[in-house]
Amino acid sequence: MYTRPVTPLSIGGVLDDAIKLYRASFGRCLILSLIGGILLGATGIYMATQMRALGFAPDVTSGSTADPTAALRLVAGAMGAFFRIYLLISLVSLLLYSAIFAQVNDVAQGGPRRSQMDIFALALRRVPGVFVAAIIFGVAVSIGFVLLFIPGVFLWGKLQFFMASVFADDVGGIEALGHSWNATTNNWWRSSTILMVAAIMIFILELIAGVASGLLLALSGGLHSADLLGLSAAGSIVRVVIYIFILPMVPAVMLSTYYDMKLRREGSDLAARAKSMQSA
């Protein structure tokens, strides 16, 4: 059973706590992670199918190539379809990701276990605010990167915990951005280091997934004959499995780090109050 720390931890301690939280919440997130993995895998296969359909082979009967105007219209139509599919999948993925965050946060807070329907209902209520906050986060960080890169890195570190705050503090998306900003005060380097270590671990798992999909093709003898669709299908099968394990990782790390920063901030506030009372 997971018990949330009551005192601030070292960087290694926060990572260890995140692993404990991940293990404790993995079973609850299994169905959500499976749905998310299948969704991402199916998206890859769909995109590969559409890309193959866009191939313009020469017309061997007439000896001429395809009509350039028709080809441009086909590409424009495909890009429009891609955008619509991408937007739909992004919204569904945001809902699933919010539900995973809610599930992991339930474990972190030690409350009674809620049903999947209750978790989805909570996530659905939070999605509009999370969506708006995600847009603000993306625009702010993008502008910061344009402005000599460093402001973008700074803003990324200050605002990246907005989703953890949405569920940990039970607030809306805009307010959560402010909570993330306040929580990372005097904790920017520390929190960014923790997330960077976690990102490297996830990258290694993704790399293993890529190698595994390549080996799967090689063992099946499909490397010489596989087309884009075959390669994407093989990779998607492996990713579905790996995403089941990856998807709950980020919420666990985010929430462990955020709760630790809150403890540090509360401790600093208490110390400041005690000092002001002594001065008085």
Image (spheres, rainbow, N blue to C red):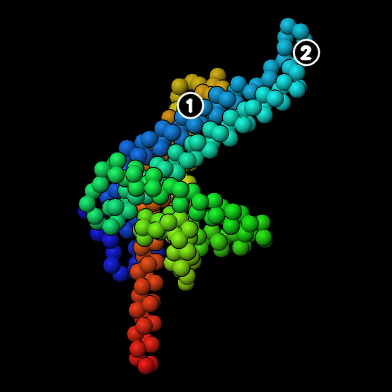
Asked which secondary structure carries label 2, the reply is: loop
Q: Position of residue 258 (x, y in %)?
A: 39, 61
Q: CA distance from mark 2 to mark 1?
A: 33 Å
Instruction: Please say if the residues under marks 2 and 1 sit with CB atoms less than 8 Å apart.
Output: no
Q: Position of residue 105 (x, y in %)?
A: 32, 53
Tell me if residue 176 can be seen.
yes
Residue visible at 65% across and 21% down in the picture: 55
Q: Image quadrant for the C terminus? A: bottom left
Assess disc 1: are there few (<14), some (14-19) or many (≥20) residues with their C-alpha within 10 Å of its C-alpha.
Answer: many
Give residue 64's mark. 2
Left or right for 41, reference 8: right
Asked which secondary structure carries label 1, the reply is: helix
Residue visible at 49% across and 20% down in the picture: 221
How many numbered marks are there?
Answer: 2
Q: Nearer the viewer, residue 36 or 76?
A: 76
Residue visible at 42% across and 56% down in the picture: 172
Q: Nearer the viewer, residue 9 or 96?
A: 96
Q: In front of the other: label 2 or label 1?
A: 2
Say above or below: 280 vs 23: below
Mark 1, residue position: 233
